[in-house]
Image (cartoon, grey):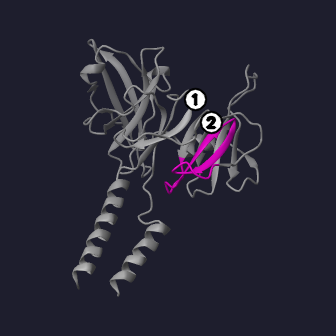
Amino acid sequence: MNYRSILIVCLATLGLAVAGWGQADGKIAFISDREGRGDVWIMNADGSNSINLTQGRDCASPAWSPDGTKIAYIAGGEIWLMNADGSNPQQVTDDAVDKARLWWSEDGSSIYYVAVPTWPLPDEWDGPDAFVTALDASGSSPADWREVYSRFLPGVSPDGTLLATVWLWDGGGHKHVDFYIRTSASDHMHPGLLLPESLQNKLIYPEPYENWRTFPTWSPDGLRIAFSGFLDFMGQFEIWAADTDMDNWVELTNGLGGREPAWQPMVPAATGVEAQSWGRIKSLLSH
């Protein structure tokens, strides 16, 4: 093998390694008002390189497709779908139902969602209206909201075996965080996690703030969680992340605001473009 071939191999190996390293922690999608409207943003797992994907759409409930290549979200009361980089936005629903939250089906072929209840609630009200819609905009069908909630619980680990919540409380003048990680067989609570010194004298209200609990989103490897809350009751939401063993606490949004975090699932190892590029590299090596 000549020096040219060795160089090509080195560059190719380095490129594939960098691509794989960049996917290790994935991206976090979230909602932020930092540019005046509730847009869908993405950032690296360490909070760096925040990018506005929707540019003034007034969005909610960002959700990654199971393969991590697309993001669904609610805008104008309808469900939209776009590529992970914000390109090719497409409207999925057109039914005038005011939607509260959405979830992908496990196989990525459809999206479940629940409607915002109409107030005042009727005496016989037993839960929100729920629907499932295919991605080809062919329409929605009713679904049982109990089944939707039971199948798509927030805070479920990537392997589906654990359910986590975050509990924030004031103990002895210090603000603490408890991670509750439960399995089907038992309940488990980690000891309190002392907040960083910069947050010691401030209240943190989780999202949602009722009962001081919040459901986190897990990293693809199941080792870190992220959640949102706000400092001071009238303040804006921020996003934090920490290891599930209570280490490496980081405020990801750094005072710029963020809520509804959703961690990107592991992206497939090689996209079509990467496969084509590797094919060209192999072609070069054969000459």
**Residue that badge 1 annotates:** 37
Q: Position of residue 232 (x, y in %)?
A: 42, 14
- Inspect this view and state whether residue 157 appears: no
Give the residue type that dot 1 points to: Arg
Label 2 crowd bin: few (<14), some (14–19), many (20+), radius 10 Å? some
Disc 2/disc 1 C-alpha distance (Å)? 7 Å
- Return the residue found at the far bottom: 287
Decide: marks 2, 1 in contact (CB < 8 A)? yes
Disc number for residue 122? none
Q: Report x, y in % for residue 116.
A: 68, 30
Q: Residue at x 48, y 27 (%)?
A: 207
Q: In this view of the protein, can residue 216 be seen by the observer?
A: yes
Question: Quadrant of the rendered structure where residue 243 is?
Answer: top left
Q: In this picture, is 142 found above or below 178?
A: below
- Earlier along the polypeptide chain: callout 2 or callout 1? 1
Give the farthest residue toward the front. 4
Q: Which mark is residue 57?
A: 2
> Which segment is the magenta one?
64-89
**Image point 44% across, 62% down: which residue?**
268
Residue 86 position, x and y percent, is 55, 48
Vertical order, 253 against 43 (above or below): above
Task: Assign a secondary structure to mark 2.
Answer: loop
Given the image, on which type of amino acid does mark 2 rest?
A: Arg
> Does 249 appear above or below 185?
above
On whether residue 65 falls in the magenta region, the answer is yes
Q: Nearer the viewer, residue 39 or 243?
A: 39
Quadrant where the C terminus is found in the figure: bottom left
Residue 202 rendering spot, x and y as whole percentages: 34, 15
Q: Image quadrant for the N terminus?
A: bottom left
Residue 16 lies in the magenta-colored region: no
**Helix, strand or loop at mark 1:** loop
What is the quadrant of residue 177 in the picture?
top left
